Image (tube, rainbow, N blue to C red):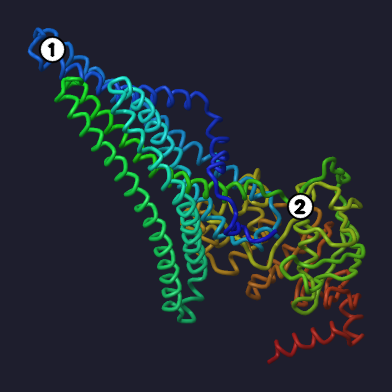
């Protein structure tokens, strides 16, 4: 898939708002109440000029009795009360719909993102995706919670007001409507430019979010290399670009608003001029012209507000299209229509048969080339080789984060492409080289291995991974917040939590990627002992450079450029004098140096 950001010439029409409606329409009761309240508020607004006409014609004419005059004002106050209550009800339910719709959209997008393969996140920046879930959904929230309601209210007032204007003074109303075509022309001409500028502005905001996320996530590197000034300049440039794009959008909207409002009130002025002549000639009452002026003002204000609303709707259409792209993304790695069940009980046999694979982001380099390897149940296999040899790719394919271009990867005799990925991953425990600690409590980080585990199981796993001692010293024990990325822990502590997580998983297939690389000698000795207990009776694949684990492996697989170049035990490979012997010699020389 190409970059998540759509091309500049992609259509950005109001039809993209259909996504928003598909979520909002799930709440028909709230929609109905909001609609009824909106109609009542708009009707009460339009009823005010009519009541005002009666007040002027009869209340100030001197021909009505005091009791009749009071009735007119009582009616006017009643209309005001209805207007206030209906507006409050409309505001509540429309705001509720805005918040609920955005919450549902964010949940749906996040749920879909969790199903996508790693390839999607390699080709699309996670920071930009996060911006869509925040900035773009905030725009949608504004539209659902405010803009749409304002648009519908003004539309009802505008249409209803025009009808009432014709009932009051057909000639004056006809003159007023002559200005409508002149109002629509700038909307059509400038609308496309506003639409383009709105999308560009949203993209620039996403760029700012990406820079912030990237810089804050690498703050130690930024400060260690003294690049604060450069990062500040880069951020300043992005902010200036965002401001420049926003200025263009604001300028276009300001011009459009000025032209339309000028035309509207210019038309009203001309009509009022003619109306004043009719009053002077006695063909129109003072109350009628007063009602016409008030209604004309309401109509003018409604159509003027609609021009601003149109710009907001265009921005929401752009935001909706960006969100729709994430919702429409289909998982590349997914279960087949009729997945094959993995055999019971689990065996832990993993097989690679003539596998060829290239990473989507590096298609020019073969990560694996005609790779064949069969790992028997309960076997301990160590995989060694220089960087880029394809060692970690074995783990990526074993967990079915990717599918091979050719060949077959099987677990317990079932090709991974024929099984449910969730079932495959449920039989694998993984300790990655780059430990992932979530911004949550120590308990939740441990429970990632088995979420239903009780505290006794958590502490047992922590003891086996040599993590219990430092966990007990934390301020709130297992309830202590670990910080963003485990910022409150040392590298060795983070790795021991990852090992405890894998211990808790208790899966038949164990994948260890430099599992002890961040531990000191004493911790490594204790964790190695725990790992030996864990590996007993399980199939284990170890990617390691340290020979403590490699020496005890049943088999050592030596990889280079995506192929197996040597295979054997530590003793036999050392005697051969090939690549493994050279790597071992370099390690020993480095240790002695």
| SS for dot 2 | loop
In the current view of this chain or complex, which residue is farthest to the bottom? 593
In the current view of this chain or complex, which residue is farthest to the front? 281
Q: Which residue is mark 1?
A: 69
Residue lying at 67% horizontally and 52% vertically, measured from the top left: 449
Instruction: Looking at the picture, tell me which residue is in the foreground, 49 or 216.
Output: 49
| SS for dot 1 | helix
Query: Where in the figure is residue 24, as x and y percent of width and height?
Result: 52, 34
- State the separation of the CA atoms marked 1 and 2: 76 Å
**Where residue 333 is drawn, which disc sits there?**
2
Residue lying at 7% horizontally and 13% vertically, measured from the top left: 62
Instruction: Looking at the picture, tell me which residue is in the foreground, 589 or 109.
Output: 109
Q: Is residue 244 left or right of residue 481?
A: left
**Above-or-below relation of 348 to 383:** above
Question: Which quadrant is the N terminus positioned in?
Answer: bottom right
Residue lying at 37% horizontally and 33% vertically, measured from the top left: 154
Instruction: Looking at the picture, tell me which residue is in the foreground, 195 or 401.
Output: 195
Query: Where in the figure is residue 272, as x and y percent of width and height?
Result: 22, 33
Label 2 CA crowd tier, 10 Å (few <14, some 14–19, many 20+): some
Q: Is residue 500 left or right of residue 50?
A: right
Query: Where in the figure is residue 278, as x and y percent of width and height?
Result: 19, 25
Mark before the other along the chain sequence, 1 or 2: 1
Instruction: Looking at the picture, tell me which residue is in the foreground, 170 or 81.
Output: 170
């Amino acid at each position: 898939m190409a970059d998540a950001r759509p091309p500049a010439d992609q259509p950005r029409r109001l039809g993209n708002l259909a996504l928003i409606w598909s979520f909002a329409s799930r709440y028909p009761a709230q929609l109905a109440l909001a609609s009824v309240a909106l109609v009542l508020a708009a009707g009460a607004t339009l009823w005010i000029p009519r009541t005002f006409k009666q007040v002027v014609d009869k209340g100030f004419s001197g021909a009505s009795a005091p009791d009749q005059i009071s009735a007119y004002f009582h009616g006017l106050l009643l209309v005001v009360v209805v207007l206030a209550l209906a507006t409050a009800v409309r505001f509540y339910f429309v705001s509720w719909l805005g918040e609920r719709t955005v919450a549902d959209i964010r949940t749906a997008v996040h749920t879909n993102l969790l199903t996508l393969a790693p390839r999607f996140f390699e080709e699309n920046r996670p920071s930009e995706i996060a911006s869509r879930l925040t900035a773009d959904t905030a725009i949608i929230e504004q539209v659902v919670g405010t803009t749409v309601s304002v648009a519908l209210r003004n539309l009802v007032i505008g249409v209803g007001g025009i009808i009432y204007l014709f009932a009051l003074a057909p000639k004056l109303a006809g003159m007023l409507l002559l200005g409508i075509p002149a109002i629509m022309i700038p909307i059509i001409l400038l609308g496309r430019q506003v639409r383009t500028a709105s999308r560009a502005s949203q993209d620039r905001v996403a760029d700012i979010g990406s820079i912030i996320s990237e810089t804050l996530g690498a703050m130690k590197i930024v400060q260690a290399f003294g690049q604060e000034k450069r990062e500040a300049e880069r951020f300043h440039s992005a902010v200036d670009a965002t401001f420049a794009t926003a200025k263009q959008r604001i300028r276009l909207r300001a011009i459009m608003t000025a032209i339309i409002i000028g035309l509207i009130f210019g038309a009203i002025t001309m009509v009022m001029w003619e109306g004043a002549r009719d009053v002077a000639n006695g063909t129109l009452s003072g109350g009628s012209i007063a009602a016409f002026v008030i209604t004309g003002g309401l109509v003018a204000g409604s159509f003027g507000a609609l021009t601003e609303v149109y710009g907001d709707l265009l921005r929401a259409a752009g935001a909706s299209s960006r969100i729709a792209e994430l919702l429409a993304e289909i998982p590349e790695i997914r279960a087949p229509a009729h997945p094959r069940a993995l055999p019971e009980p689990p065996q832990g046999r993993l097989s690679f048969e003539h596998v060829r694979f290239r990473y989507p982001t590096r298609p020019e380099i073969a990560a694996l080339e005609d790779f064949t390897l069969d790992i028997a149940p309960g076997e301990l296999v160590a995989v060694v080789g220089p960087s880029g040899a394809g060692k970690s790719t074995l783990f990526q394919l074993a967990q079915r984060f990717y599918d091979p271009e050719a060949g077959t990867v099987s677990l317990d005799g079932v090709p991974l492409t024929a099984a449910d990925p969730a079932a495959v991953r449920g039989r694998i425990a993984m300790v990655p080289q780059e430990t992932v600690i979530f911004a949550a409590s120590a308990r939740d980080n441990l429970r990632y291995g088995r979420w239903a585990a009780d505290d006794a199981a958590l502490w047992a796993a922590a003891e086996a991974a040599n993590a219990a001692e430092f966990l007990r010293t934390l301020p709130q024990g297992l309830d202590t917040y670990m910080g963003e990325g485990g910022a409150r822990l040392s590298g060795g502590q983070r790795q021991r939590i990852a090992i405890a997580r894998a211990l808790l998983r208790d899966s038949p297939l164990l994948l260890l990627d430099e599992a002890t690389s961040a531990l000191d000698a004493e911790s490594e000795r204790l964790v190695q002992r725990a790992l030996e207990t864990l590996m007993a009776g399980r199939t284990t694949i170890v990617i390691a450079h340290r020979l403590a684990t490699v020496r005890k492996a049943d088999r050592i697989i030596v990889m280079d450029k995506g192929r197996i170049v040597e295979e054997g035990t530590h003793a036999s490979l050392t005697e051969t004098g090939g690549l493994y012997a050279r790597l071992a010699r370099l390690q020993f020389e480095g240790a002695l140096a």
